[in-house]
Structures are given as structure tokens and as C-alpha cells.
Image (cartoon, grey):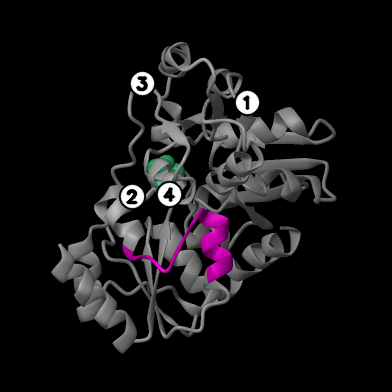
Amino acid sequence: MQQIINEINRLKKEKNAIILAHNYQLPEVQDVADFIGDSLGLAQKASKVDASIIVLCGVYFMAETAKIINPDKKVLIPDPGAGCPLAAFADKKTVLEWRKRYPEAAFVAYVNSTADVKAVVDICCTSSNALQVVASLPQKQVVFLPDKNLGSYVKSKIKDKEIILWPGFCIVHENVEVEDVLEVKKIYPDALVMVHPECREEVRALADSICSTGQMFDFVEHHKDVKRFIVVTEWGINYALKRRFLEKEFIEPKRRMECQNMKKITLKKILNSLENEYFEVKIDRETIEKARIPIEKMLTVG
Ligand code: SF4
């Protein structure tokens, strides 16, 4: 393994490449990354990098987002089969049909959506900034897509708008049960519970804090006296949290939450990607131009 890591580091320098990795990536992938973050963090980082090549270790829509923000850079994803089943819930044709059905509504797309879908919505959001984004809109009616759980969280907080939910969900977060959390809470009653907003309402109700993966770092930071946290999201984040907060303990729900797609990215695939400069993310110019607008609007909100 060390030999692969050395080669990755050598090629990064030689090719002026940067590795961006999502918090849900395998521990060894996080270890070779130059930057680790949530979707918003990766999008913001991608907008600032001066490398010639971006290797995006995450799922496909994240690599597309990096390409949309950096159209003149080479963006690589080590495994193009790393898709996001949540993003697959919304396609451009159906979004356009809904736009006809709700002509007055603002269309808000969670970044977990394809470039084609981003190109036909008004603004994007992440789980970090969904509340601010929706609150910032002048429209009274909002169609929130594709995640009904994040949408219902936004709906529970923003009462002065009619929020229409798209019927999509993330299978990893949808499947976690109340008992999975309560059973570990019984063992560690002193632990604070952090729940990702892609979880269902009844699971979110158990949270001391509902937060995106990025916000989980802030929550831990602000609770200096607390030793343990139950982390209700994909388990890769626990490694990222532990790297930063060595003295704390991060506990998974009883049943492990694992995103098979995130875990498709391996060190070997990263090495292949750097060596052969594949798999390059390609999006046509028109889609890039159109999809860029809602992403940039989001970045101005926060
Ligand atoms: S955890 Fe869920 S939303 Fe995130 S990439 Fe996997 S399937 Fe998509």
C-alpha cells in the first residue's frame, strides 16, 4: 500500500494535480487527499484551486460540479461508476414537466443532482446551506428536489413558504431506524446525537443537532466538554472526525450506514486515474453555462 501512496504523491506533484475527497471516502483515500470536505466544501475548494488536474474522490455529481465550476480544468473521477442513487431520482425531462405544472415556483436542487438537472433549476443548495438558500428566495412557492427528507427538514423550519417535495431519498439515510440510534444511546447515555438531514423525520427527532457533515465538525468543536458523539450518517465521516478530534469518541448507529458508491473509490483506482488521466468528466458547454448559474447563486448565499 505504501508504494501506491508514494506513486500517487509523486504523480500529484509531477502533474500539478490536487485530490479532493468527500468525508464519506475510505480512510486510506482521505489520507492521500489534499482536501476533505462535504459537498459545499468541495464545491468551494474546487472554485479556488490552481492545479491543472482535479481528482475528485466522491460520487459522479460531485465531479460534475467541480467541472462546472472549473470548465477549463481536467476533472477526473477514479471510478465513473460511482453514481448517487439519490441524484438518479430526478431527470431533466421530469423537472421540466414539473416546471410547467408549477410555473410560479422557485426550483431548488440539492447539489446531489445531475448537471442536466442543475441546468434547469433556479438555485442549488447543500445540506449545509439549504435553509439559508430557501429563505433567501422571493417566491412563496418552492419545489425542492430530489431529496424529500432534506426537503421536509427545510419545510419544518421555513413556515412562510409552500414547499413541494420531490419523492427522492438517499437509501443510506432513509434506511436508518429509530432503534438503531436508541440502542447505542442506551449504551452511551452521555453521548450527543448528530443526525444528517437526509434521515427521516422520526430519526431527526432524536438529534441534539441536525447537521451536514461539515457542520458536524463545528458542533464537536463547540462541545469541548463532551467526550462522545453518536454520528448518524455514512461511517466514513467518523474517520474524518477522529483525524481532527483525537481525544473524542465517535459512535456509529447499531447498523452501519455505508454508501457503496462512495466506497468504490480505492487507492489503486486513484493511481490509475493519475497515471492515465482518466476518467475525465465531460459536459457540453451549454450545460456547463446553464448549470453554473444556480451553483454560483448558491455560493453567494453561503
Ligand atoms: S450517501 Fe446517499 S446521497 Fe450520498 S452519495 Fe451515497 S447515495 Fe448519494
> Percent position (x, y) of residue 145?
58, 43
Residue 165 shown in magenta: no
- Mark 3 vs 2, N-terminal side: 3
Circle number at residue 208: 1
Q: State the CA–CA distance, disc 3 to disc 4.
A: 19 Å
Res 205 quadrant in image: top right
Q: Nearer the viewer, mark 1 or mark 2?
A: 1
Q: Which element type, helix, strand or loop, lies under badge 1?
A: loop
Please report contact status of discs 3 and 2: CB closer than 8 Å, yes or no: no
> Percent position (x, y) of residue 152?
64, 30
Q: Amino acid at mark 3?
A: Lys
Res 162 quadrant in image: top right
Residue 42 shown in magenta: yes
- Mark 2 vs 4, N-terminal side: 4
Question: How dense is the environment of label 1, judged by Cα within 10 Å: few (below 14), some, or many (20 and up)?
Answer: some
Q: Which element type, helix, strand or loop, lies under badge 4?
A: helix
Q: State the CA–CA distance, disc 3 to disc 1.
A: 18 Å
Please report contact status of discs 3 and 4: CB closer than 8 Å, yes or no: no
- Mark 3 vs 4, N-terminal side: 4
Circle number at residue 240: 4
Q: Amino acid at mark 4?
A: Ala
Q: Which residue is mark 3?
A: 254
> Percent position (x, y) of residue 210?
62, 33
191 versus 99 height, above or below? above
Question: Does the rendering let one see residue 85?
Answer: no
